[in-house]
Image (cartoon, grey):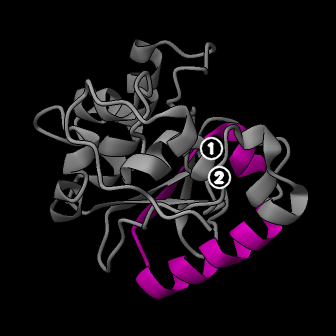
Amino acid sequence: MARPADPIETPSARPTPAALAAAVGARVPDLIGPGLRVLFCGINPSLYSAVVGHHFARPGNRFWPTLHRAGFTDRLLRPSEERELLARGIGITNVCSNASASADTLTPDDYASGSARLRRKLQRYRPRAIAFLGLGAYRIAAREPKAAVGLQPAPFAGVAAWALPNPSGLNAHYQLDDLVECYRALAQAVLSP
C-alpha cells in the first residue's frame, strides 16, 4: 500500500501524476476521538488527499468553505488545519478507507466491509451524530435505498444519522449556497448544548 507523502502546506504545490498514481489504496488517518458532536463521513479519500495526508484536500472540494459558512468553524480552515476540528467536537472518517481516483471504483464488497468498520468506530467513540457526505454512500452503507437528504428516521449503529450532499466540486446538483443550507441544519442540531 502506498504511503502518503509529507503534507503539502502551500496551495501552489500540487502532487505530481506519479505521486497520485502511487496513492491508489493509501489511507488518510481518521480524525476521531471520544465525545464528538458530529463525525463527518466521506465516501473514501481522493488520491490528492492521500498524497497530502489531509481530508477533503483536493482543490475544488467545498467541504471547508461549507463548514465555515454553515457555522461549524469561526474561520475558513485549510485542510492542513483539520486537527483544529477535534477541539470543536468535530471528526472526519470515511466509509471506505482506501483512496481511489473515483468513488465509482468502489465495489459492493468495499461498502459492506467499510460499513462494518464504520459501525465498530461508532460503537467505540459514540459521537452525538454521524453525517454521511454523499446521499448515495449513505443509501448503500445503511441499506436505505430511498433515503433523502437530512436527518434520517433511524439511527446508524445507534447514532443519529444525517445524509448530506457530497461537497465535491464534481457534485453539480448542489451549489455552495445549497450545501451550506443543508449543513447548517446539522450545525443547528449538533452544536447547540
The C terminus, quarter of image = bottom left
> Residue 120's spot in the image, x, y percent?
60, 83
- Tell me, yes or no, whether the highlighted magenta stretch contains residue 103: no
The amino acid sitting under disc 2 is Val
In the rendered image, the vertical position of residue 124 relative to residue 17, given as above or below: below
Residue 44 seen anywhere in this rendered image of the structure: no
Q: Which residues are magenta?
A: 111-139
Q: Which residue is mark 1?
A: 21
Give the quadrant of the N terminus. bottom right
Residue 152 sits above or below residue 104 on the image: below
- 28 and 74: which one is in front? 28
Check contact, mark 2 vs mark 1: CB within 8 A: yes
Q: Which residue is mark 2?
A: 24
In the shown orientation, is residue 49 left or right of residue 89? Answer: right
* Residue 157, percent from left and from top: 63, 75
Nearer the observer, 22 or 30: 22
1 vs 147, left or right, is: left
Q: Residue at x 44, y 28 (%)?
A: 61
How much space separates mark 2 and mark 1, taking CA atoms?
6 Å
Which residue occupies 22% across, 38% down?
A: 78
Magenta stretch, overall SS? helix
Q: What's under tag 1, amino acid-wise?
A: Ala
Say whether residue 136 is left or right of residue 170: right
Could you tell me if residue 115 is visible in this image?
yes
